[in-house]
Image (cartoon, helix red, strand yellow):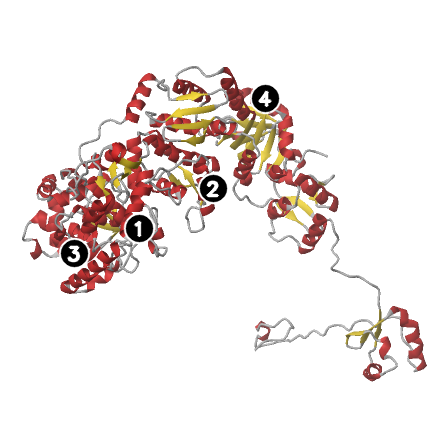
Amino acid sequence: MSFRTIHANIPRGAPTRFDAYLEWLDATTLNQMARPVLGPETPKLKKPDCLRELLSALRDPRAYDAMAGQLDDWSRCGLSLIRRYGGSLPVYELGGALWMCAHPDRKRADPAQGFVGALLTFQSRGLVLFANPVFHPSANTSPVARSVAFADARLLAAARPCAPPPLPVTPVSVKRETLRATAMRGPAEVALRISTLVEAIEREGGLALTQQGRPNRSAVNRLGKALTGAKTTIPRPAEPLNDESGLLTGLLVAAGLLQQGPNQASLAISQTTRDHLNESYEQQTRRWAWSYQTLTGWAEAQPGGAREPIQLNRPGTLNALRAALLVALAALPDPTAWYPFPEFAAAMQNALCGVVSLRPNLETYDSTFVYMARRERLARFQRQEQLYQASWSSWELPWLEAAFRGVLYHLGLVEVAIPATSPDTLLFRLTDLGRTAIWDVWRANAGPAEGDAHARAATAAGGAVPGNYWVVQPNLDVVVTLNGLPSDRLAFIGRIAARQSAAQHVATFRLTRQSIYHALESGLAFSTILDDLTAGAGQPLAPTVVRTLHDWAGYRERLQVRQAVTLLEFPNSAERDETAAQLRSAAAPLGECFLRLQGPAVPEEIRPRIQRELHYGFSSAPCLTVSEDGVLTELRLPNLEIRAHLGHWAEPSATHPGEWRLTPESIRAGVRSRGNSDDLWHILLPQAQDKETPPLLVIALGAWTASTPNTNVSLATVTVLHVTDPGTLDAVRRSPLLAPFLAHEIGSGTFLIPTERVAEMEALLRRFGIEPQRSLPPPKPKRVETYQSPDIGLGDFPSNRHGRRRW
Amino acid sequence: MSDPLSHSAHAHPLAPGEVVVHRNVVLLETDDPTLLAEIQQDARVRSAIVAQLSPQVALVRREAAARFIEILRKAGHTPKVHET
């Protein structure tokens, strides 16, 4: 069986049925899938019959119950995983997780197929199909990287959940006083860093993208300053992340909370991000854990000697390893116990070795496997397994340790420690948050989380629940106690105040004019800010604080930018005022004869009077003609922007309304008032009907805008000697006496004579009997060839530019 | 010299009873004319402000609106931005 993908885009989280995709499968795959449903006689059926009978059988819901009833634990475990991710999962992640779930009996997955063996086994059991949005004509070489595995929603509903089998690791009994060093991040600490990043992106107006569509490196580094603005010490044995802003940005993108903005050139905070930050810490952490699994590139550490992997920007081995790591944590026998990291790593090595490797020359998936005989594949697999074993300690093991000391710690999923008795051994255990987000989700439904309870209480109370979450000081600093702080309160304070510093239990924020402004711009009402800030403090705010907040909100009201306004223009102020009185509050008078409407819709009573509609922001039809002498003539009534630019750059005609003239004075006045001539070149002149501005006018405008004359042209009075007779011309050319007078021959028989030597030369010519005339002979008329073609139509033949016919 | 923004200074002016609708216009409004004058003096935003419709209202070039808002903010102003 080969890795075969269906050309389809399976949206994440959408319930999917197999029916529509079965006909894409080849006969062998279809037969294998049908066997659990149709029974052992299936191989005798031809593909059309097999397809028909399978579709017919799948219409009966009991078929899924029957299928689900036959599933072993490994299959149920895999389906549980797919269900958790909404019905579909990238194949690398599913593959890594399935190998980890198969650890008690690795033969269940087909080792001869290498990494895809587990996936193909699932496909042959009719549990999953693989889809790729990009069409690949050769199914055998379908790339695994971008493919997604999906399961039928009815089978997912019928299958009983199953947790991964316990990992063979032994808990160690540890007393806290026997630990030399421990490091753990509290839920609020983790959420605080993410909300700080979100607010920083929001304040920056988005995150710029490169032309390849990746976050701009310098923009990500700038965000990093927001995180490191307040120094946070990382206790040993945890380690600081090399690129925390890059990691958190990647998590936001993977979680769909940072999406491509309308201009496609940047990433913007999505509408759901605020809701997500208000979710309980447990819900947030579940999302981060999944997002971590889907990250591309070295988020943990790059093992020594590793090149930039080709999977830096596409899914690959790292995703398989991360998925396996999360499954391994979910497979810990006791979720509250401490475990030695080396033993855990060895258990992972046993489960994965031979199928997943970070070492560049050991590809996880080799598409050429399918062309080999089974025995050959198995032999190759065994050879590779030996190589994997040899490379584990220098590749996967350091990566895994870095994951524990780095990402898993920073996401608050594990607590790491060093025992006093054995300083070289790293111990770890799941935090409460990690247990809920990683271990519990495979088992019983998690109970209501703290944040949910707070949100429900807030809804019931009709607003924020009072509590002593922070102290608002008269100098506008807000000291927040992180222990027990509900996630929605943390999101609120992060939205209205700028973070100053953060320690394990306390964070300091500052209310600033800019932070309050951004909170208001993000949609928070001023009354909500004031009420929730007061409620979180558990006591009234100081009067100076309230007054300052009022002032800042007032500043925002003083200056308003209205986008997408609809204006009505009237012939005179009397008509405008009359209509304003009719429309009352639906319109506001503006200037001499404008009305600003409150919304985009034009009132019904105005519509019959509309003479013209002008849309801004779209390229409009040209409304001017431009003549070479700088006269601009309007073809129709221009929009307000063009009218304004006509006023800036041209002088109106006193006699002809709608006619304007570009003059040196008007252009210089325009440059003075506008600062430069960009508007002239890029806005006004492109309004010309003839797209090309007359070249001589371009020269003139260039000179007028530069305020310096064009000195590339010379105009002077010269004297020429013109000789028509060939004999005389030959004599003049060869004469040594005349040579000093002939500056340059500019045409046949025509010489330039230095003006100061004309009299001297005239005398010399007379001496030799030549009497020069005072005027030049008229030019000879050009000879025009004509050809009369009486009969044979030669006149129809094309002629070249000299009038000669081409044959 | 007549006001170039007024339709009467142009070809095909409006006849009595006629109305022109301008859609998708960007306006900068303030309650303080001196604040508007101060902003117009700023070379960074001058090119975006096309004309003044009244002492408190200026017309902003549609294509430059996003950049205009960004520059206003960087200059320390806190404009209330209405999307529609």
Q: What element carries label 1?
A: loop
| Residue A398, horizontal then vertical, whole percent | 29, 50
Above or below, A96 against B25 in this view is below
Query: Residue at horizontal 44%, vertical 31%?
Result: A501
Mark 2 in CB contact with mark 3 (< 8 angstroms): no
Residue picked out by circle 1: A315
The amino acid type of the residue labelled 1 equals Pro
Mark 2: secondary structure: helix
Left or right: residue A182 compared with residue A566: left
Residue toward you, A254 or B35? A254
**Label 3 vs 1, first from the N-terminus:** 3
Front disc: 3 or 1: 3
Camera-side residue: A472 or A769? A472
Q: Is residue A602 left or right of residue A743?
A: left
Q: Are marks 2 and 3 on the same chain?
A: yes
Q: Numbered disc 2: what chain?
A: A
Helix, strand or loop at disc 4? helix
Asked if badge 3 and badge 4 are on a common chain, one would say yes
- Identify residue for label 3: A111
- The x and y percentages for residue A289 are 29, 39
The reply to the same-chain question for discs 4 and 2 is: yes
User: Pointer 4: residues within 10 angstroms few (<14), some, or many (20+)?
Assistant: few
- Mark 4 lies on residue: A578
Which residue in the structure is indicated by mark 2?
A222
Q: Where is residue A439 in the image (x, y as percent from the top left)?
A: 21, 36
Tell me the quarter of the picture where residue A647 sits: top right
Amino acid, disc 3: Pro
Residue kind at label 2, given as amino acid type? Arg
